[in-house]
Image (cartoon, rainbow, N blue to C red):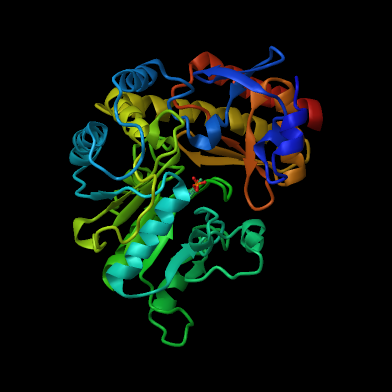
């Protein structure tokens, strides 16, 4: 494999190619091929951008058809048939059946663009400045979003400028079992000397992805919604990673039966790995003035075409979500088995997650890296997350076949035994 030019020209900031230093050529479903003829099972799926797998045939057809018809490709926010069709699919397939009434804002194509837009709008709509986020939360790495992202590695990489406008609260479980961290939030809200400026919004992931696959409890989420309503604080759910079916429902907050004021989606939203994000918001919150928050790529037409196809293909009934929940239980069992083995060997480990967003916590980043490096040698692509990188994270495509899923889990188990036995 010829990698010299890649190593020589690409900035040191490159990251995933360090864990997986091969040149990939093609991919289908949950399998990837590299130039040296090796095959890999993909439990990373473009960091959760490929919930429907690599190159899904129906979504690909929609893309090819759109290109073949000379459809508009650029991403300026003009009206196109592709945009209209996406909005129709979103309303018919996703919003109406869930009783959700949202307008849509189309920001730049990445997740952090959606977070910047949602939090700015929360400030404009409420006239308040502070946005509350949570320990171990991850919401992107541009200047605005960094105010809500806990990870010091990213926060330190601003060249000395301090991210502003955020206030961190302890996430569910942060202070150990038996402590409801929302007691602290409620107390601060009622305390004029607590140091918390009355917030515009609360921003959170219902299952923290980069932070270590930490699912917030259902009761905790309901109580948070109640607190937000009582104090007229906006509730923003960042569903960039946990959304689009990852947890077994289209929106991760459906499990708790809560209704956010705003929702951000990206990662798997295009269904094909194309850059695409949106903000959903209650219509009353749409206080934007025309062109007030602008950009050149605000709504990528190719992504509209693939996203609409994905929504219609997978979300017209509940067959797909039930299948995701079933596969989630398969991963849960597989991870539990590995966790028990590790614990018996003297390395305390545990598993957690919701749906097909699952983590195997092996205690330290060092152990997690050993296992995932060995797994890569054995043909499995899987990454780590958490404050120390101590959680091995399953983000396999939701469409993965039972055979590939079993094989991936088996590779992980074998790899664990090879390096920790
Ligand atoms: C990935 C991610 C983001 C940031 O998305 P980018 O496209 O990398 O800017 C924000 N929030 C969550 C929950 C994410 O997982």
Q: Position of residue 342 (x, y in %)?
A: 72, 35
Q: Position of residue 389 (x, y in %)?
A: 68, 46
414 over 270 or under it: above or below: above
Q: Residue 338: in sight, yes or no? A: yes
Question: Left or right of 18: which side holds 95?
Answer: left
Q: Position of residue 166 (x, y in %)?
A: 48, 69
137 over 267 or under it: above or below: below
Q: Quadrant of residue 341?
A: top right
Please identify the quadrant where the C terminus is shown: top right
Q: Quadrant of residue 318?
A: top left
Residue at image position (29%, 30%) is 308
Q: Residue 223: in sight, yes or no? A: no
Of 358 and 125, nearer the camera is: 125
Please identify the quadrant where the N terminus is shown: top right
Residue at image position (66%, 31%) is 338
303 over 208 or under it: above or below: above
Of 59 and 359, nearer the camera is: 59
Residue at image position (63%, 19%) is 40
191 over 165 or under it: above or below: below
Question: Left or right of 84: which side holds 262?
Answer: right
Of 26 and 341, nearer the camera is: 26
Question: Left or right of 97: which side holds 421?
Answer: right
Q: Position of residue 14 (x, y in %)?
A: 67, 41
Question: Left or right of 339: which side holds 395?
Answer: left
How many numbered circles are shown? 0
């Amino acid at each position: 494999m010829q990698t010299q030019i890649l190593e020589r020209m690409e900035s040191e900031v490159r990251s995933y190619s360090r864990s997986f230093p091969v040149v990939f050529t093609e991919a289908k479903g949950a399998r990837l091929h590299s130039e040296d003829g090796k095959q890999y099972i993909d439990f990373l799926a473009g960091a959760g951008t490929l919930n429907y797998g690599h190159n899904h045939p129906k979504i690909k057809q929609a893309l090819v058809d759109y290109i073949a018809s000379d459809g508009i490709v650029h991403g300026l926010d003009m009206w196109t048939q592709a945009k209209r069709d996406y909005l129709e699919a979103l309303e018919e397939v996703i919003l109406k059946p869930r009783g959700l009434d949202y307008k849509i804002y189309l920001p730049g194509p990445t997740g952090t663009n959606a977070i910047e837009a949602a939090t700015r709008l929360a400030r404009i709509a409420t006239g308040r400045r502070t946005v509350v986020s949570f320990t171990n939360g991850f919401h992107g790495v541009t200047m605005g979003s960094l105010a809500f992202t806990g990870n010091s590695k990213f926060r330190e990489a601003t060249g000395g400028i301090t991210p502003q406008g955020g206030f961190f609260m302890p996430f569910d479980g942060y202070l150990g079992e038996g402590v409801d961290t929302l007691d602290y939030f409620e107390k601060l809200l009622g305390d004029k000397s607590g140091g918390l400026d009355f917030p515009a919004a609360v921003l959170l992931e219902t299952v923290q992805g980069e932070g270590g696959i930490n699912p917030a409890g259902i009761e905790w989420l309901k109580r948070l919604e109640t607190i937000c309503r009582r104090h007229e604080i906006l509730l923003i759910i960042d569903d960039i990673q946990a959304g689009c079916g990852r947890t077994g429902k289209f929106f991760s907050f459906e499990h708790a039966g809560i209704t956010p004021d705003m929702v951000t989606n990206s990662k798997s939203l295009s269904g094909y790995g194309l850059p695409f994000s949106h903000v959903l918001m209650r219509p009353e919150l749409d206080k934007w003035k025309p062109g007030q928050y602008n950009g050149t790529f605000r709504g990528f037409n190719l992504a509209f075409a693939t996203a609409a196809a994905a929504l219609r293909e997978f979300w017209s009934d509940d067959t797909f979500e039930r299948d995701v929940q079933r596969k989630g239980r398969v991963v849960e069992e597989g991870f539990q088995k590995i966790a028990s083995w590790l614990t018996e060997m003297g390395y305390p480990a545990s598993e957690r997650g919701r749906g097909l967003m699952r983590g195997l916590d092996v205690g330290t980043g060092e152990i997690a890296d050993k296992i995932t490096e060995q797994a890569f040698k054995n043909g499995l692509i899987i990454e780590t997350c958490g404050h120390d990188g101590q959680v091995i994270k399953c983000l396999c495509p939701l469409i993965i076949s039972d055979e590939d899923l079993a094989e991936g889990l088996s590779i992980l188990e074998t790899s664990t035994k090879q390096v920790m036995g």
